[in-house]
Structure formats: C-alpha cells, structure tokens
Amino acid sequence: MIFANTLILLATFCVSFLGGGMVWRYAMRSKLLDIPNTRSSHAVPTPRGGGLAIALSFFVGSAALLALGLLDSKMMLALVGAGAIAGIGFLDDKRQLSAKLRFGVHLAAAIFAVSILGGLPTHIFSGLGPIEHWIRAFFSVFALTWATNLFNFMDGIDGIAAGEAIFISGAGATLNYALGGDAGLTAAMLCLSAATFGFLLWNWPPARLFMGDVGSGFLGFTLTVLAFATSQRGGMAIGVWAILGGVFLVDASVTLLRRMLRGDRWFEPHRMHAYQHLARRWHTHLPVTLIAAAINVGWLFPWAWYAAHYPVQATFCVVVALVPLVAAALLAGSGKA
C-alpha cells in the first residue's frame, strides 16, 4: 500500500506540473493574462488559471485513492463542491463574472458539502438544545465560505498561496498520521500537497503562471472540507487547523475588520493586506513568501503539534499562537489605507 500511495503522489505531482505547462500555453494563446493595474503586486502581464492544474491533478489522485478503497465515496461526494468552486473560478478568470454569481456558487457548494459530510465538531455546540443542529450548520457553512474566499484574498504575490496550501495540507497529513487518524484523509492531504507543489514550480517568484480564482478558491474550500473531516473522524481538534492556517487567517481577518471599521467598501478588491504592504516596501515578493514559510514551520507547526497531542489545550494554543501574529500584522500594515 505504501508503494501504491507513493506512485499516486508522484503521478499527482507530475500531472500538476505538466498541466501547469499546458495551462501556460493555453493562456498565452488565448491572451488569458493578468494585466497589472493599480491593485496589482506584479509589473508584467502574466498568464493565469494555473490552479486548474492543481484541481485536476488532485481529483486524479483522489480517484486513485477511491479505487484503492482508501478514500470513501462520501468524502469524494463532499469534494464535488470543490469542483464547482474551481469551475466558477476558471470562468471568472476568463471573463470576470459578477460577485453575486461567484458567491452564490460558493454558498451552494458549502451547503452541499456540509449536508453530505457534516461540518464543525458537534461538541462545540453541545447544550444548545433543539437549535443545536441549525447553529452548527450555519457556522459550518459560514466557515467554509469564508475559507474559500480567504485564499482568494491572500493570493496576491508570487508563491504565497501555493506555499501556504502545501504547508497546511502537508502539516495536517503529518499530524493526522501521528495521531492515528483516517489513513484515507492523510493520503488525500498529501495528494493536495503534491498537486500544489507541482504548480508551485511555475508560481515561484518571479512567477511564470498565476493560479487565479480557479486555484485559490479550490484550495480554500478543499482544505476546510478536509479539516472538517479530520476533526470528525478522530484525527485532530479543529483548533489545530486554525493554527496551521494562522498566517492567512490573521492577515485576512485583521485587514477585513479594519476596513469595515473605517467604513471602506470592504467587498471591493484592494492592496491593504500585510503581505502586500511588505512586498511593496521591499520591492520584491520572495522575502515575504519565505517569511510566511518560516512563520509556518518555526512558530505555528510546534503549537499545532502540541494542540493536536493535547486537545484539551487546543483553545489556549490557538490564542498563544495567533495573538503575536495579530500584532505582527498590524505592525506590517494589515488593513492600512
């Protein structure tokens, strides 16, 4: 089984890398380019839509896991929503769809996934009486929709979103395996990491290919569905996932909150995230991407490991791990006009 899993991961990586090349050629022929504007963090027109390679290669790997009996049909059905997210994202990359249409698809996909798989752990909402189920469903759909858009917000400089997805899925797989969690979910997370790594070779600074909405929305949705599944199947406390995604969670949330408090049109595109301020200040993307990776590995992963092994302390770990990131984001200019 280990040999088969290794082959699946290698195949997923190769399909993603080769698929990235195919998307690059298609984007160049079709003029599917991200043209720099006042909100951009890049200076030259760059092909976009590379996230399509991530989504397709992940589904190829997941189908192989399903055929081996590692991934169950219920989990695969829940991930159908991820395909819908990728599809609407690719259409948006091609021809700028309305925000209402995109949000409608995101919301429908989240409702579908939660109805199939369930959402946040039940113990979080215990004691709420007859409305417990509906409150759990509401917050689960909200969390899934927010995470889908969070990755889109944070995909603004070369390599940062792909690097974040590789870390979250790879670290999640490591901790789930260490805790004796569902083997199929561990393999699925590794597949997602391999698929994203194949694309990262195209997206590493200076990027030759952007993932676009097709990739960012797909990654945010898929990672959250996997987080829900591991928390339900005895793997990890949901707080572990909040720690692993802390860099994106903090920067996006602080930026959004400051813009709302200031009375900005917070739903419109902008360049006010901390990572965007740093990239402009340093006139390059690579140091910012590397700093995010260093925070993930050197600070967040140890706290996630502790929270995973001592779940009763998970809430404490979330606070201790993320509060310094809030301070750092504010210092870096998160949400600053």
Image (cartoon, rainbow, N blue to C red):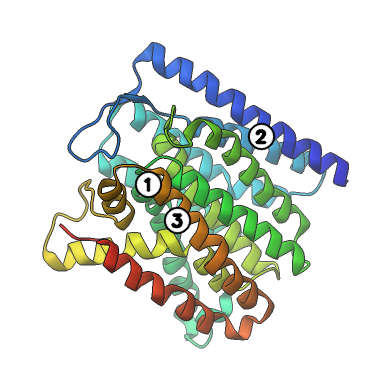
Residue kind at label 1, given as amino acid type: Asn
Which of 90 and 323 lies nearest the eye of the viewer? 323
- What's under tag 3, amino acid-wise? Ile
Which residue: 22% across, 52% down? 267
Foreground label between 2 and 1: 2
The image shows residue 334 at horizontal and vertical percentages of: 27, 61
Left or right of 119, for residue 325:
left
- Residues at discs 2 and 1 in contact (Cβ within 8 Å): no
**Label whose residue precedes the other's in the sequence (2 or 1):** 2
Q: Within 10 Å of the Cα at label 1, are there few (<14), some (14-19), or many (20+) other Cα atoms?
A: many
Q: Which residue is mark 2?
A: 13
Q: Is residue 217 visible?
A: no
Taking the spot 39% from the left edge, 38% from the top edge, the residue there is 213
The quadrant in which residue 168 appears is bottom right
Q: Is 101 displayed left or right of 336 in the figure?
A: right
User: Which one is in front, 111 or 185?
Assistant: 185
Q: Position of residue 311 (x, y in %)?
A: 63, 80
Question: For the residues marked 3 and 2, what is the alpha-carbon distance in whole angstroms?
Answer: 25 Å
Q: How many numbered markers are drawn? A: 3
Closer mark to the observer between disc 3 and disc 2: 3
User: Which residue corresponds to mark 3?
Assistant: 291
Residue 40 in percent (x, y) is at 25, 38
Q: Residues within 10 Å of mark 3 (few under 14, many from 20)?
A: few
Query: Eyeballing the image, is 133 above or below 185?
Result: below
Q: Nearer the viewer, mark 3 or mark 1?
A: 3
Secondary element at image label 2: helix
Q: Which residue is the site of mark 1?
A: 152
Side of 18 where 73 appears, left or right: right
